[in-house]
Image (cartoon, rainbow, N blue to C red):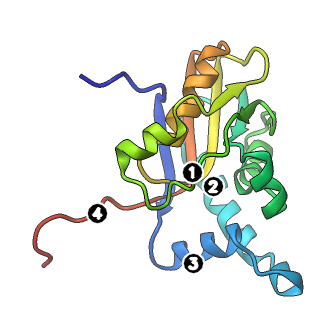
Amino acid sequence: MGQRSALQTCRAAIWFEGDALQWIHDFKYPARGLAGCDPRARAVVSELVVRAGLESREQRPELVVPVPLYPRRLRERGFNPAALLARSLSRAWGVPWNPVALRRLRDTPSQTRLDRGARQANVRDAFRARGRQPAHVCLLDDVVTTGATLEAAARALHAAGSTRVTALCAARTPAPRTGPRA
């Protein structure tokens, strides 16, 4: 029997396919140098998250928290995509955000090619909250596939005092199709 989810809800603005896949990829992985200075991708992805947040009927949280990157990955990338989105959503909702409420304890391998079980094992106990956290927190990430990362982060927030953890993401990866395609 599985463990009860630490997330009360998980909402994504759009499916991670087609044009959305390209916009999010361009936002997360900008080209080096001047070619990477195109602000359109960031604007499009931020708008997706803000609209999804404003359209949500969920009660507003007390705090918006981005899923953190490990320090080495943050240095390599130069920014945390989830933090940029969290800041935009925080402004739209008029609630505070905290980019350091959670810290990533381990430099976990990329989840991209892992199945559900491997993803869960990869991020188990990978996060710790810094100090006591408010009762209702909204976790923010760019893309959700199995929810393993969000689940692990939510568990860390619960351990630090949060009683309700919801999640909002720019996109959700569609479930793989099984059987014959029409």
Q: Is residue 61 visible?
A: no
Extreme bottom residue here? 35
Q: Residues within 10 Å of mark 1 (few under 14, many from 20)?
A: many
The crowding category of the residue bearing disc 3, from other C-alpha atoms within 10 Å (few below 14, some 14 to 19, many at least 20), is few
**In the figure, is residue 148 to the left or right of 69?**
left
Is label 1 in contact with label 2 (beta carbons under 8 Å)?
A: yes
Q: CA distance from mark 1 to mark 2?
A: 7 Å
Residue at position x 52%, y 73% in the image: 21
At 46% from the left edge and 28% from the top edge, which residue is drawn?
A: 8
User: Which residue in the protein does label 4 denote?
Assistant: 176
Q: Counting residues from the N terminus, which is met first, the one under dot 3 or under dot 4?
A: 3
> The C terminus is located in which quarter?
bottom left
The image shows residue 125, relative to residue 141, as above or below, that is above
In this rendered view, identify the residue nearer to me: 14 or 68.
68
Element assignment for label 4: loop
Give left or right: position of 23 versus 93. Answer: left
Relative to 173, is 125 above or below? above
Badge 3 element: helix
Q: Quadrant of the N terminus?
A: top left
Q: Are marks 4 and 1 in contact (CB under 8 Å)?
A: no
Residue where numbered disc 1 is placed: 169
x and y percent of residue 112 in the render? 49, 60
Task: List the residue tagged with mark 2.
Answer: 49
Q: Nearer the viewer, mark 3 or mark 4?
A: 4
Label 4 near label 2: C-beta < 8 Å?
no
Badge 4, how many Cα within 10 Å: few under 14, some, many 20+?
few
Q: Which label is found at residue 156?
A: none
Amino acid tagged 4: Pro
